[in-house]
């Protein structure tokens, strides 16, 4: 299946607590023509944020077997929509013993390409989603809820989530490492998806949380979103 995201900006909605800013302001931007994406616990974000402007996610990435099994009903409802794109990995399908699901929906399923950056480091879920979008010609990508986290006690990590009560404690352990690895390694991996000079020239990735612990991308406040969307070129 061939997808092309070059014709309009892409917005990735994530689960950091700062995404509340998008929830509070989303109605100001209901006129914008945007491809909305998310990953894993996607229905929470769609229900509480995008539904306010009668919009839906077009692309969802499910990164692991446990996430797939936990949200299988939601995934089946999502994949039944016209023009929806379900992104996952062959390992997720295999480990979840979901061959029947795959055979039924294979025309709507895309598989992410996994790259081990170093022997001990795999890209995190967002990096894999970004790599997919870049491969499919996305030229302008905005990210909300992309907060990262510095060194804190494990019990404090849950406080960084949007709707923290809906997240499993066993997902907390890797957030600090994800932040470190994203800032140190993953941006280079994105640039290696295609020719480096092409990527640097054609992809604008912006994080709409000025206080984010992620330093890899340009950061803008919510107030700059419409100008970012409207800017011709990059």
Image (spheres, grey):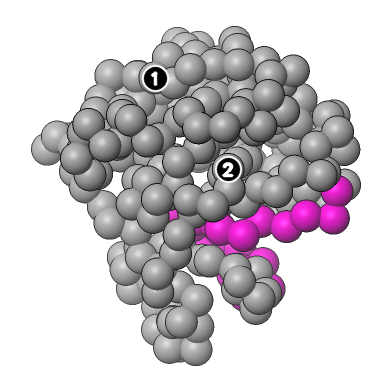
Q: Mark 1 points at which residue?
A: 216
Indicate whether 54 appears above or below 191: below
Identify the residue at horizontal 69%, vertical 19% (top origin). Answer: 224
Q: Provide the residue designation for mark 2.
A: 9
Check disc 1 and report its element: helix, strand or loop: loop
Q: Which of marks 2 and 1 is in front?
A: 2
Q: Quadrant of residue 189?
A: top left
Depth check, front residue: 95 or 33: 33
Q: Is residue 82 above or below residue 152?
A: below
Query: Where in the figure is residue 191, as x and y percent of width and height?
Result: 26, 34
**Residue in view at x 82 percent, y 43 percent:** 30
Answer whether residue 128 is visible to the viewer in this image: no
Residue numbers of the magenta segment: 53-77
How far apart marks 2 and 1 lie (CA) works out to 19 Å
Who comes first in sequence, dot 2 or dot 1? 2
Image quadrant containing the N terminus: bottom left
Point out residue 43 in the picture as x, y percentages from the top left corner: 70, 55
For the residue carrying disc 2, how many other residues have a C-alpha within 10 Å: few (<14), some (14-19), or many (20+)? Answer: many
């Amino acid at each position: 299946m061939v997808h092309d995201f070059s014709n309009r900006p892409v917005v990735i909605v994530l689960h950091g607590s700062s995404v509340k800013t998008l929830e509070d302001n989303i109605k100001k931007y209901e006129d914008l023509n945007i491809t909305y994406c998310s990953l894993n616990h996607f229905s929470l974000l769609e229900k509480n944020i995008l539904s306010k402007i009668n919009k839906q996610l077009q692309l969802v990435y499910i990164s692991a077997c446990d996430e797939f099994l936990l949200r299988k009903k939601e995934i089946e409802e999502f994949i039944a929509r016209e023009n929806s794109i379900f992104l996952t990995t062959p390992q997720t399908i295999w480990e979840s013993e979901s061959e029947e699901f795959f055979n039924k929906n294979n025309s709507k399923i895309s598989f992410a390409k996994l790259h081990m950056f170093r022997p001990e480091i795999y890209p995190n879920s967002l990096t894999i989603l970004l790599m997919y979008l870049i491969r499919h010609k996305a030229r302008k990508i905005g990210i909300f809820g992309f907060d990262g986290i510095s060194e804190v006690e494990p019990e404090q990590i849950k406080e960084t989530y949007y709707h923290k009560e809906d997240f499993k404690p066993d997902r907390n352990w890797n957030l600090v490492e994800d932040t470190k690895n994203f800032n140190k390694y993953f941006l280079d991996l994105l640039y290696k998806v295609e020719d480096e000079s092409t990527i640097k020239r054609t992809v604008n990735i912006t994080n709409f949380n000025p206080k984010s612990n992620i330093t890899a991308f340009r950061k803008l406040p919510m107030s700059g979103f419409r100008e970012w969307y409207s800017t011709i070129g990059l």
